[in-house]
Image: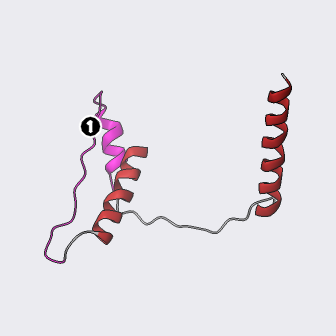
Amino acid sequence: PEYAGKMNYYLSLLDRLERGADENRSIGIILCAEKDRVEVELALEDMGKPIGVADYQLIVPKEKLQKILADEIKAFSEEKGNN
């Protein structure tokens, strides 16, 4: 199912940025090592269903999160250098 979503994303991007007015919509091909008809049918069924998107807010402000990560990376590097 994740490949169907990614393929849809890339095809939409391709059509929006590269497709000419006189060209047909792009198509995608996903090659699978194993055949699971039910999984494929469910992944591709109703790809046009509406999907809602909502805003989200990080629990920790972005700047604080960046500082925490930078401090952790620095501490890890220093610890690794002492071993």
Q: Is residue 26 left or right of residue 16?
A: left
Q: Position of residue 50 (x, y in %)?
A: 43, 66
Quarter of the picture holding the C terminus: top right
| Left or right, residue 81 beside residue 14 | right
How did the renderer colour the structure? Answer: secondary structure
Label 1 CA crowd tier, 10 Å (few <14, some 14–19, many 20+): few
Query: From this viewpoint, which residue is outermost toward the front?
Result: 81
Label 1 sits on what residue type? Answer: Leu
* Local secondary structure at mark 1: loop
Give the extent of the magenta segment.
21-46
Which residue is more in the foreground, 66 or 10? Answer: 66
Instruction: Identify the residue under disc 1.
Output: 31
Where is residue 15? Give x, y as percent. Answer: 28, 67
Q: Position of residue 73 (x, y in %)?
A: 78, 42
Quarter of the image for residue 41 reads top left
Nearer to me, 72 or 5: 72
Q: Residue at x 81, y 59 (%)?
A: 60
Q: Is residue 1 visible?
A: no
Up-down relation of residue 22 to residue 57 (above or below):
below
Which image quarter holds the N terminus? top left
